[in-house]
Amino acid sequence: MIINHPILGPRDSQEFTYLGDAALIDRPDWQAENAADQFHDYLYLRDNPAGEHRELWFHEQGDRSWLVVTRNTVTHEILNVELARDVARARGRSK
Amino acid sequence: MTDAVMNAGRVAFQADGSTGARKGVQVNRLDGGLIKGSKALTFTFDGKSYKGFEGDTLASALLANGVRLMGRSFKYHRPRGVLTSGSEEPNALVELRSGGRQEPNTRATVAELYDGLEANSQNRWPSLQHDFMAINDRFSNFLTAGFYYKTFMWPAAFWEKLYEPIIRKAAGLGSISFEADPDAYDKGFLHCDLLVIGAGPTGLMAALTAGRAGAQVIIADEDFLLGGRLNAETFGVGDLTGAAWVEQAQAELAAMPNVRVMPRTTIIGAFDHGIYGAVERVSDHVLAPEAGKPRQILWRIYSKRAMLAAGATERPIAFENNDRPGVMLAGAVRAYANRWAVTPDQTVAVFTNNDDGHRTAADLIAKGVKVTAVIDTRPDAPKVEGAELFAGAQVIDTKGRLGLEWARVRLANGTTRDVPCGALAVSGGWNPNVHLTCHQRGRPAWREDIAAFVPAGELPQNMSVAGAANGDFSTAAALRAGAEGAVAALSELGIETKAGDLPEAEDAPVNVTPFWYVKEGKGRAWLDQQNDVTVKDVKLAHQENFRSVEHLKRYTTLGMATDQGKTSNMGGLAIMAELAGKQIPEVGTTMFRPPYTPVSFGVMAGRSVGEEFRPTRKTPSHKWAEEQGAVFVEVGQWLRAQWFPKAGETHWRQSVDREVLQTRNSVGICDVTTLGKIDVQGKDAAEFLNKIYANAFAKLPVGKVRYGLMLREDGIAYDDGTAARFAEDHFVVTTTTANAVLVYRNMEFARQCLFPDMDVQLISTTEAWAQFAVAGPNARKLLQKVVDPEFDISNEAFPFMGCGEITVAGGCRARLFRISFSGELAYEIAVPTRYGDAMIRKLMEAGEEFGAVPYGTEALGVMRIEKGHAAGNELNGTTSALNLGMGKMVSKKKDCIGNTLSEREGMNQEDALKLVGFKPVNAADPVQAGAHLMNADGEVSAATDQGYITSAAYSPVLGCSIGIGFLKSGDSRKGEVIRAVNPLEGKEIQVEVVSAHFVDPEGERLRG
Amino acid sequence: MGKFDNHGLKAISPLGGHEPRVDAFTGLLIREVADRALASLAARQGQEEAVKSAAASYLGGALPAPASWSEAGVYAAWWMGPDLWMVSAPHDSHELMAGDLKQAVGDAGSVVEQTDGWCRFDIEGPRCFDVLERLCNANVRAGKAGDATRTSMEHLGVFLLCQEPGQKYAVIGPRSSAGSLHHALVAAAKSVI
Amino acid sequence: MRYSGLKVIKEALTGHKGWRPTWRDPEPKKSYDVVIIGGGGHGLATAYYLAKNHGITNVAVIEKGWIGGGNVGRNTTIIRSNYLLDGNEPFYELSLQLWEGLEQDFNYNAMVSQRGILNLVHTDAQRDAARRRGNAMILNGSDAELLDTDGVRAMYPFLNFNDARFPIKGGLLHRRGGTVRHDAVAWGYARGADLRGVDIIQNCEVTGFKIENGKCLGVETTKGFIGANKVASCVAGSSSRVMEKAGMRLPIESHVLQAFVSEGLKPVLDGVITFGAGHFYCSQSDKGGLVFGGDLDMYNSYAQRGNLPVVEDVMEGGMALIPALGRVRMLRSWGGIMDMSMDGSPFIDRTHIDGLYFNGGWCYGGFKATPASGWCYAHLLATDTPHKVASAYRLDRFRRGCMIDEKGQGAQPNLH
């Protein structure tokens, strides 16, 4: 597969390490009173869609950017690639 | 230029300038052809010597020499000859070469002839002519499709003891030598705007068009001769013969720097996003590769656009005994005559359902071969010059034990006629080579007018199909499609160009009346000739409800042979459709999957073989350790010194015990460079480490080191190490050797995805520093001789868990850490890696007066077990801080990765496993890692399992074997005697549960 | 060697020699390079511009853009990742460059000495394209001088710096695997040439 | 009709006219006691054991394509009982024992062949782990032997003992492990279930569940609504897709695993070998093809195909282990969708919806589990209590912190 890196352009997916669903960015608040449940859902449950999937790839043999790749899990077509750091900030993550 | 090109790449048409007059040089050799007539090549088949020419394949050369019998079928060991002239060949499989180069199942039709070629027939005993296993054929009526699912069941034991061994012995095709392949293989990567797959008229025209437009073009063809069918046909292109036009085209392409022409290169698969796998056969056409040169190369081709121009494959018609040597595809017979100047026999008959078959008759007649009849299933068959035509007729049987002698024909008027023929050229029409279009989501569609499947559905991204592969069978249509396809592909890339003038060429329409099998006859009509699947087998599959295409394939094994059914699937499908009363498209097609043709293990492995299978990482002291005669061990990709044997030591334990005792009694030195080192900087570095580690780091003073435990988010401990604070905003974190990459990755995840606004910068410095542990009572004394005097490393100035930047050996910058894995007074000292070799020598020299020893990973392991430190065997991915006895370290006051889920009830049971030590009750008993723990008495079973021993070693200090491991409620069971059972090796010993800290439990030594 | 290692420790090259290794082929030269000091420079959070200008004045040239490298005087630098660069200079004269660089950028950047984290092989000669296409997936034939590509060769992550397209490149890989990287380069050269 | 050698001979002499369909193709009834979604190995085995063990025959197995078209038809045919953890090993041991009697039980020759499985070890730590595993196997009634280098060499002298990057230091041998003719398993269970009255309905896709006040009443399908007292999902790689129709999110990701077969060869490998230092395992089929595989492609996928890097990785492993394979050719590759769970272990459980049951999360271990999975799922469906050897396979185990993590990789499915 070819991942169109937002900074570096098309790169062979072999340079990347795959993690999984981009929802792993949304780490729950440890102090929420149902934190245990939230962490359970966060870590263990997946939409696992047959279709568009936002997922985390790490450019380990490259610039070490974590990317959020939107990819169709049926056709493997890649629709969008973003820097995970930008996505994380956009989702309100900070420190 | 042109000459050079002509002599490169391909065997040029009459390049030797001869008239091609060689009729009769071999019994079935004709005049003309595209082989070099100048010098004859010698080769052997089954030990018998023959002659052929450059440009021959093994198959063409054997036919030239009058050899029709080339193999035996898989199941019934039926005598078989060559069916085709290409890579779709199901029958003529041989063992090529011998020794480590022995190559089973090689298609004689694609094996290029070279001087000294050695080939042997396979899957027969004792000989190809007299194959004992042909006995199976006698029982074929019992061995129908799937018969084995219905028998061999009683008595139960007999399947494995009797039936299966016999079946396995009989099964299989060729054999391997069991010697290592002596040849080298290579890999490479190519990029292009347009990849053209196939160099027939379509592909060549496409490459010319794209090349002239300046695009980066790769054109690949599995054949060693470009041109595809143009080499096999007599009709011309423009005012040139087909072959001459090919040569001209190739010359023009070769002159273009932007075009890469790759003959002998098979595109094996269409992978995601325009990536194609290609195997180039660099040296298969010579006796052996040049020294250092590869036999084959696997190319990964990154294409912006690809055009499939792979042509079409002819399909046979099934009729009784249609598998005798001499029964061939009509197009193949024509190819042998026109390209290789060979006829399979002096008398040939033709059996066809379409006009193309007639070309074979015409071409053979033109070459002076006697064509005894043209049998055409169509009542309105066109006239034939120079041969008898039977219109509306069918071949209903053939005779000839090891080779065809005559064919029995049912004439239109119902009478039969026996037609003498040593070869029968059969044409059932042509199937476009759609294979690569199916490697992803493409599903072919049926085209009634040509009675064949053509590419359809979702083709691989940016792939187009042109020419015969797309159902356009005429040369003119192919040239047009190639040119227009290239123009279209380039315009998608923003390169505008025109098709240009195309040469004149034949534009005959496809004229075919579908005809799949002759219904007459009680005997067997063969579909899949290699796997011996007959029309009857398909009928039986239908009768037993194996009606979906996949069930049919799996039940009958149709299309599962080495040719993957390239010539047989279509017939099976058509017959199943007929039986099910469906249209062919309703039945569907089976999946075509990579590779297009089989590929060797060697080429897929490339250079990653033997010791180069994976990279080797060497420590800074490697060279020195080698000089000391160290024994090395693989630790991940690292090679580390395991122990340093001394003269007179005959057993590794002697060396390891000595290293341990000398370290504990005086001082030892160990290269610990392999531990991961990650440099962490930034205003929020401390806060960041608070998140990463289970324990707190924010308040760690500058100049101090702290042990840290890392949890996964699920609360399981996965790595531990130390973090040294060199400045308010600067830490150096160490990881275990095994997890260095993982920890760095996870820290980047936390930095970029979880805490994107923290001011933290990370970078690995694992390799930048050569780091040595100096451990033992004399460690400080030794170091004081190496560390430059202005640095005070006394206990007061540089206490336990201190760290700092210093210089050694008169000005070499270094880092010093007062940390201890061995439990002794110990330091770790780091210098820039280039000085590591000199540093170990310096340390050993300075340690001489103390009898300093180097110690390896074994002694390291013994000492850490004596101290009860967890390592890889304890951090096994299922153990929590609680299990490790570090539950209290997990801060509840702060957020850190893993602390929330570590509180789940299942991970905090009353009787949770706890890390403890074990001592044998009988000091002579060896404690073994991997032994399970059972209570002192009661049964030994999974139900009564109390835990397991993770690490064990002989402790020279305690004079007995010891172990650490996980025991239910272990921390409250000290002093209890239990059993360590190892039924795997028939061992059971009594052990006492003790603290995991066997040596210096109070830790006074390391503070001393 | 350099003015900073007048101490008692003698350096060895990544391949373990006291002199750098050279392998010559027809149309290709593979040279081990051990005389460059390296330091990584990362911009602190929100300090990207500050670090760039500070570095520019120290290096006498701007830090390179993504996927490229540049040189100015004795200094060279390549882009490693977002807000992260590797700076290089002659080892003999700049063994302590990391400290100096940190001085120059102050709190705007994080600097880490990387000199001995890496091994480097310069390959020169007209056969560069042919050999490199057997080693890595970088599209070298379409490349230009100044390209800095992170790619992998025989399972090893490396930086490939293009000095002159088709003629001169630097391959920079992990020091501990210098032997394996060298073997890969030489094996590919033998296979091609 | 019973199959036997005699029957084969009789049919041969009478023109094979007597062979009947191996299973019928009935139209679905309005409702069933149990509707099993998924005509794969597990679904068909479940139907078979419901009928045979529990006398529940008013059962339909509905399959969206052709039966046995999922992983039972595209795996590498290995059966084994060499698990480490208490939650797993008893289950897989039951499965292996069922394999041992399967053919006589369902009167179909699935060619169960206990050729032995050898897991190679290359480091001392791997040997320690192998010893712990081997002991766990024996304590659970399975079999295991620990071999040293010479023991391995004696079995397979052609492995790389010369210049291996990761030398072979021994292996854990599981003699009762082996291979099975995979397609035949689906066909044998289908035939056995069909003979007992189970309706096998092919080309019938589930489009939704009918759920009213917390109770599942049946399934909507492309052949209309089919009512059921109990609906049992058993769709492996499609688990998330199907259960999503019931509003459930699962601790499962779907990943693609490639598998490969070589051209037919005269006997090379007698048993199954797994390479402990790379991603490669291999056996040889009765037809002579080397059947081999390796690691997942690693990314979520519902496409039954993989990509080139993993093909290379697997075959590099093959060459590293057996240098004599250099000139052997890989004939065909394919991919299967693995229902990778969060701890690498499966689920056989009721859901929070009354009457809706779930079986999945088999990762790439589903084939060997087929008999026990069917056996235990049938037990759960018939008695509403988990079978004792499957009692750990609960959906809520992560909430409770009771993971069954054989590989110790945590909640990252592609690493299991």
Image (tube, grey):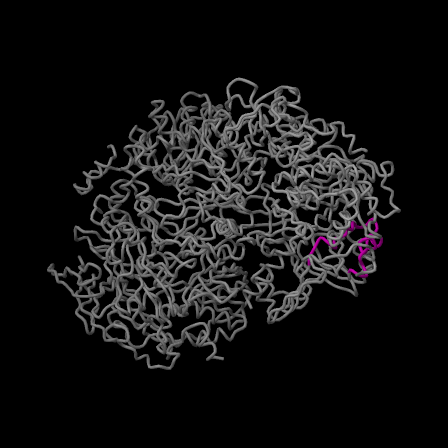
Visible residue check, residue B123: yes
Furthest residue to the front?
A: B648
- The stretch drawn in magenta includes residue B282: no
- Dividing the picture into quadrants, the one containing residue C141 is bottom right
Numbered marks: total? 0
Q: Position of residue D283 (x, y in %)?
A: 42, 44
Please state if B245 lies on the left or on the right of A18 as rendered.
left
Front-lying residue, D384 or B810: B810
Q: Position of residue D285 (x, y in %)?
A: 37, 44
Magenta span dominant secondary structure: helix
Please state if B881 lies on the left or on the right of D6 as rendered.
right
**Is residue D220 positioned above or below C34 on the image?**
above
Visible residue check, residue B758: no
Furthest residue to the right?
A: B790
Q: Position of residue B710 (x, y in %)?
A: 68, 35
Front-lying residue, C169 or B968: B968
Q: Position of residue D62 (x, y in %)?
A: 38, 34
Looking at the image, which residue is at 32% across and 41% down? B164
Please state if C155 lies on the left or on the right of B4 as rendered.
right
The residue range painted magenta reads C91-119
Quarter of the image with the C terminus of chain B is top right
**Is residue B79 positioned above or below B263 on the image?**
above
Front-lying residue, B147 or D243: B147
**Is residue A90 positioned above or below C10 on the image?**
above
- Dividing the picture into quadrants, the one containing residue B699 is top right
**Is residue B982 positioned above or below B260 on the image?**
above
- The stretch drawn in magenta includes residue C95: yes
